[in-house]
Image: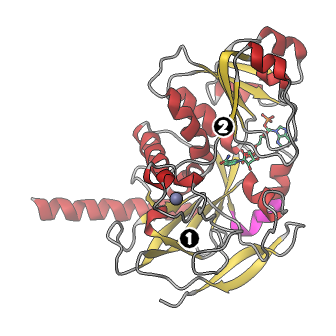
């Protein structure tokens, strides 16, 4: 079908300022669904991209947004997985080859032909555009159903930030509380990392750049310990204590002092994406048989697993819901580390206050209809 017209917020150049922009979605194919976007997370990766910090050959105009929750308003003829009206999520990738060994083993996020939701080129040659938009088209394989127990705005940050923490941490899922983990940087990814790791039963130390978030980390997020990375005494006392560190920090930071926090054979997992090279000294790595590794979002299977894990445990994300027109201000505040803990933008046509209530009512009446039909 011919792509429909959509209204969006786009960056035009590397100043990263976003302004209103109209465009046509790509023509939709038999396996595509079209969403009416309800909410979209606003996260630090969007900020890196609009400023041209993540990949060379950045493409403008660029519509960011890769934590997209929407209602299906159009279905391709071959789509069996979803129905009209379903609430679905789209995260950090919208395409991959589907045939390589990575794609076949639920690691499609590492496929050499993966396609990003924006700042990339789709298979038909059109630029991909993200969820700061009224609508989005996506192949059914890259959409997930939002569990009924989760409100759409709550689900949004799980689709990228959440799964970025869940995917590497799940290697310790099912281990007991003897696992001691560190979460570096208490922002969008970090706060979800603390919640996920705690729900997995780990003993969690938050490693933060200042003392400002100590009370909230211990009281609201239930962390077990808090370290200020610039406090040498605190860092020294905590040496050799952690099995892993999830590093979410988006700016340059030499890794040396953090690697000292790891036990022998401990692992530091980089998910934050600073532009500059990070420094490592060989001695501490060799003597402690330590590993520094990286991790990119998670697979579609991980996303669905996380949504179910989250809904099953009745967990909540800590977000500030704003109108999409607030996006420039949101980026400004994010850069100043002035948000608890990330923003979710409500699309212009979404009445943020009422939508979840309407949806709950709609789901209740559908369930009642099903009950009547089944009785
Ligand atoms: P965020 O909300 O801005 O949080 C980053 C946190 O890092 C801050 O809350 C802050 O925590 C800490 N920080 C330390 N120094 C900072 C500084 N100078 N400026 C800003 N923050 C500083 O970012 P996010 O959305 O969580 O994303 C974090 C990073 O992960 C970004 O680089 C993003 O691109 C990347 N990311 C990667 C993936 C992936 O697949 N690998 C997926 C999503 C995001 P404290 O106050 O506790 O120090
Ligand atoms: Zn592949």
Which type of secondary structure does the marked residue at label 1 adopt?
Answer: strand
- Choose between 114 and 175: the one closer to the eye: 114
Q: Which mark is on residue 191?
A: 2
Work out whether residue 228 can be spotted.
Answer: no
Which type of secondary structure does the marked residue at label 2 adopt?
Answer: helix
Q: Residue at x 63, y 47 (%)?
A: 296
Q: Is residue 83 left or right of residue 94?
A: left
Whether label 2 lies within 8 Å of ligand 1 gets the answer: yes
Q: Which mark is on residue 45?
A: none
Q: Which mark is on residue 37?
A: 1
Magenta part of the chain:
323-330
Residue 20, percent from left and from top? 76, 79
Residue 267, percent from left and from top? 66, 25
Q: Residue at x 41, y 45 (%)?
A: 308
Residue 322, percent from left and from top? 69, 60
Magenta span: predominant SS is helix
């Amino acid at each position: 079908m011919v792509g429909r017209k959509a209204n969006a917020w786009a960056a035009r150049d590397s100043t990263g300022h976003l302004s209103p922009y109209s465009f046509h979605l790509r023509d939709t194919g038999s396996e595509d669904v079209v969403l009416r976007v309800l909410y979209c997370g606003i996260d630090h990766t969007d900020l890196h991209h609009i400023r041209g910090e993540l990949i060379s050959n950045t493409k403008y105009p660029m519509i960011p947004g890769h934590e997209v929750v929407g209602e299906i308003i159009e279905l391709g003829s071959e789509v069996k997985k979803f129905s009209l009206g379903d609430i679905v999520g789209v995260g950090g990738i919208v395409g991959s080859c589907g045939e390589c060994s990575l794609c076949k083993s639920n690691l499609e996020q590492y496929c050499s032909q993966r396609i990003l939701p924006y700042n990339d080129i789709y298979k038909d040659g059109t630029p991909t555009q993200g969820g700061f938009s009224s609508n989005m088209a996506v192949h059914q394989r890259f959409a997930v159903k939002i569990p009924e127990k989760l409100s759409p705005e709550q689900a949004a940050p799980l689709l990228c930030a959440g799964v970025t923490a869940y995917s590497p941490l799940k290697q310790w899922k099912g281990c007991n509380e003897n696992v001691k983990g560190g979460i570096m940087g208490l922002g969008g990814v970090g706060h979800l990392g603390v919640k996920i790791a705690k729900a997995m039963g780990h003993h969690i130390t938050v490693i933060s750049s200042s003392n400002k978030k100590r009370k909230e980390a211990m009281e609201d997020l239930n962390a077990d310990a808090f370290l200020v990375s610039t406090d040498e005494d605190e860092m020294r006392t905590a040496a050799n204590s952690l099995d892993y560190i999830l590093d979410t920090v988006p700016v340059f930071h030499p890794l040396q002092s953090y690697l000292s926090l790891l036990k022998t054979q401990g692992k530091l997992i980089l998910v934050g994406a600073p532009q500059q090279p990070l420094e490592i000294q060989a001695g501490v790595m060799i003597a402690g048989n330590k590993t520094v590794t990286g991790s990119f979002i998670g697979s579609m299977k991980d996303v669905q697993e996380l949504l179910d894990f989250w809904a099953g445990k009745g967990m909540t994300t800590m977000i500030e819901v704003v109108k999409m027109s607030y996006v420039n201000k949101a980026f400004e505040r994010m850069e100043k580390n002035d948000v608890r803990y990330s923003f979710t933008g409500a699309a212009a046509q979404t009445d943020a206050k009422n939508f979840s209530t309407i949806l709950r009512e709609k789901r209740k009446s559908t369930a009642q209809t099903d009950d009547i039909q089944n009785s």
